[in-house]
Amino acid sequence: MGIVFSKLLDAIPTLWLVMTLVFVALRILPGDPALVALGDFATPEQLKVFREQAGLDMPLWHQYLDFLWNVVTFNFGASFITRESVAATIAHVLPYTIALAIAATLIGVVVGIPFGVLAAVRKNKLPDQGMRVFSLIGYAIPDFYLGAVLLLVFALHLKLFPINGGGVGFADQLYHLALPAITLAVLKIAFLGRLTRTSLLEVLSKDYVRTAKAKGAPPSKVIYKHALRNALLPIVTGLGLSLLATLSGAVAVELVFNRPGLGSTLIKAIAERDYTLIQGAVVVFALMVVAVNLLVDVLYSVIDPRIGR
């Protein structure tokens, strides 16, 4: 618990900096949120009433303090455009983004790590060469481009998957999740596979691994009990980075597949200058980043208890 509490304290200045940057960036961007919300034909009186109701007529320092207090109390206010609760809007779309991130990461782990182990064990042979080629392709193709290609081939032409939406019901949601998750997982497979190969090859050259082989230990025991366990720290680091990249990549993928989620909601809010929704969405993204980093630190202490001391 000590490491968790320590990391949470370390995250507070980061969250404060993120919130401050978001607040300042929104205020210096061109465009009047009142005019965007009410339209070009709004009268000066209507614009004035809107700014008063939204608190935009108050001094910046007052708006800033209100914003910080709202974040602390998780009261993000109402959307400038829809007038619906920002918290309720985020609560509605957040599960779609979390499901996408988890599904893509699981595919990356289940496929990428065994692929990397096989490439390390069969170094310079066909599986290793295949790993290298796949890694180059996975790194080179942007998520939004791969998503568009998969959408055209498997949804529009072959009609094997739905074109857009998030689905209704568990089975239908999984059906709608498949293509977006595969799109995000390709880079994860390439990254985790290459990282696992590199880390495992380094450990396989250690003296204790050669000793285990000399004692006649079965190859599977040497690889999975002795080598892979000691190669996990960089893999866990890569897994954390991969999950963070998945959260950012989800924005583009949600747009390509017209899928509900926090990323697509944030992009729409930016286009509409919806201050309250933007602020709420960015704060939630920041909290998710902190949670991922905290999870990685906890996994570190589980894999190697000396780290948590």
Image (spheres, grey):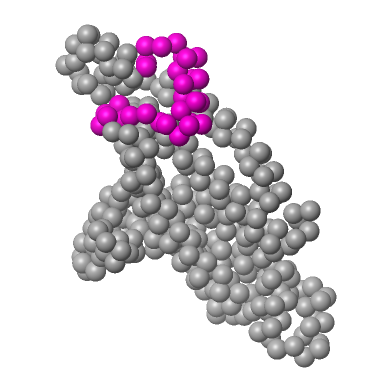
Give the percent coordinates (x, y) of residue 253.
36, 51
Q: Position of residue 67 (x, y in %)?
A: 46, 24
Residue at the spot x=61%, y=49% of the render? 294
**Which residue is drawn at the image coordinates 19% and 11% (left, top)?**
43
Q: Is residue 54 above or below residue 288?
A: above
Q: Which residues are magenta?
A: 55-83
The reply, left or right, for residue 159 in relation to residue 253 is left
Residue at horizontal 50 percent and vertical 50 percent from the top: 245
Question: Is residue 94 placed above or below 136 in the rendered structure?
Answer: above
Q: Is residue 215 left or right of residue 83?
A: right
Residue 268: which quarter of the image?
top left
Q: Nearer the viewer, residue 272 or 6?
A: 6
The image quarter in which residue 122 lies = bottom right
Residue 29 appears at what percent x and percent y?
40, 22
Foreground residue, 104 or 136?
104
Give yes or no for residue 229 being in the magenta stretch: no
